[in-house]
Image: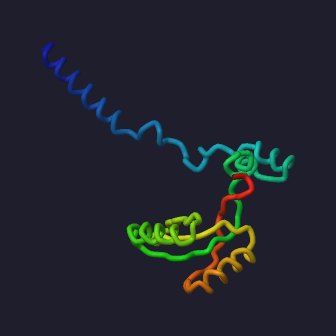
Amino acid sequence: MVNKRNLIKKILFFIFSNVYALQDSSLFWYDMDKVFDPIPKTTVIIDDIFKTKQLDLLDSLNPKNKKIKVGFRLQLFETISKDIADEKRLNFQKVFNDTIYVVFEAPLYRLQLGDFFSRKEAEEKKKNLVKNGYKNIWIVKSRIRNRTLF
């Protein structure tokens, strides 16, 4: 009789523990739409004081970003092959004796020349290159290095 009671207790324990385990997890009983934290008010305060976003302000304080400006470059060539881009970059580097940037924007590798603050500067350089036989060159807007800080 004692063995039957122990067996029944074990079976009932097994059944109840499995039923309890199959219930919804305690992590999913709440509504996910109401869980999100509210937007912190610090950005509003920074906006009111400095008339800018907090991230923009912090980004501008980074010394690296003082060297980067929006300007223009001359795009010399583009290809889908990295090997061809590297080969052409070396060739252009020898000819122009200036920095040739390789910009990857999937699926193209673009070779760009120069750091021009104004479009007029870029157009003058482009005219000189066209006179020297380079035909397929165009001006692109880009983030450029600030030459005055180097």
Is residue 83 depicted above or below 31 in this figure? below
User: Residue 8 appears at what percent x and percent y?
Assistant: 19, 23
Left of 100 or right of it: where is 114? right
Point out the residue furthest to the right here: 49
Q: Residue at x 69, y 52 (%)?
A: 150
User: Residue 107 appears at what percent x and percent y?
Assistant: 44, 71
Is residue 16 depicted above or below 102 in this figure? above
How many discs mark residues in the rendered view?
0
Q: Nearer the viewer, residue 22 or 91?
A: 91
Q: Nearer the viewer, residue 4 or 144?
A: 144
User: Residue 100 appears at what percent x and percent y?
Assistant: 55, 66
Q: Nearer the viewer, residue 125 or 81?
A: 125
Quadrant location of the N terminus in the rendered image: top left
Q: Residue at x 67, y 71 (%)?
A: 72
Is residue 140 depicted above or below 144 in this figure? below
Point out the residue furthest to the top here: 2
Is residue 17 depicted above or below 85 in this figure? above
Left of 125 or right of it: where is 57? right
Left of 104 or right of it: where is 124? right
User: Residue 133 appears at what percent x and percent y?
Assistant: 56, 86
Corner quadrant of residue 144:
bottom right
Q: How is the image coloured?
A: rainbow
Left of 76 or right of it: where is 45? right
Q: Nearer the viewer, residue 7 or 84?
A: 84
Q: Residue at x 26, y 32 (%)?
A: 15
Q: Residue at x 70, y 80 (%)?
A: 123
